[in-house]
Image: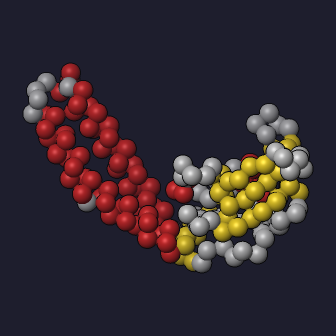
Amino acid sequence: MTQTSENVTWLTQEAYNQLKAELEYLSGPARTEIAAKIAAAREEGDLRENGGYHAAKEEQGKQELRVRQLTQLLENAKVGEAPAADGAVAPGMVVTIAFDGDEDDTLDFLLASREYASADIETYSPQSPLGSGVNGKKVGEDAQYELPNGKLASVKILKAEPYQG
């Protein structure tokens, strides 16, 4: 998965390949598709009142932003191994925590950057309050993190396993 340290993003080979494939698609076929949409919408006439044209231009802007993000991410990437299953919380791990030590009130989440956000599991970045609070802790240890209202919340690390998604 990923871990950011001094503008270097650590990626597994699988993650690097996935992001590189996305970049290649967005830089090639997707650019051609959006250019065709813009050209077709432009031919419809008056651009000031052409919703299809404006929607296509907005889509193009979002796509180009993603291309720049991926380019920067991959330029600063260092490819390495997936985290070890040693019970320590690290980016790329699925973490199970219990709130306030109550093992009936638990949360499973992936500790990773937003590039790994998935509908299958909630994702918290290592820089988020919860992520930074649990990062580096071991199974069985307690961790604290600051809530938006400034109060501290306590959690207990129940499980930390490498993400298999």
Q: Residue 119's x, y, as percent?
A: 54, 49
Residue 113 in the image: state x and y as whole percent.
Answer: 59, 57
Left or right? Give the position of 145 relative to 33: right
Identify the residue at image location x=44%, y=55%. 69
Quadrant in the picture for the C terminus: bottom right
Up the image or down, 133 lies above or below 21; here it is above
Which residue lies most toward the front here?
A: 104
Image quadrant occupied by the N terminus: bottom right
Q: Residue at x 86, y 50 (%)?
A: 103
**Residue 148 versus residue 45 in the image, above or below:** below
164 horizontally vs 106: left or right:
left
Task: Give the image location of residue 38, x and y in percent.
Answer: 19, 40
Q: Quadrant of residue 10?
A: bottom right
Relative vertical location of residue 83 with respect to residue 157 in this rendering, above or below: below
In this view of the protein, which residue sits in the foreground, 155 or 5? 155
Quadrant of residue 93 in the image?
bottom right
Kindly tell me whether residue 144 is visible in this rendering: no
The furthest residue to the top: 49
Left or right: 113 with respect to 31?
Answer: right
Residue 103 visible here: yes
What percent of the width, then of the height, locates residue 60?
30, 44
Q: Quadrant of residue 71?
A: bottom left
Residue under the image location 24 percent in, 57 percent down: 29
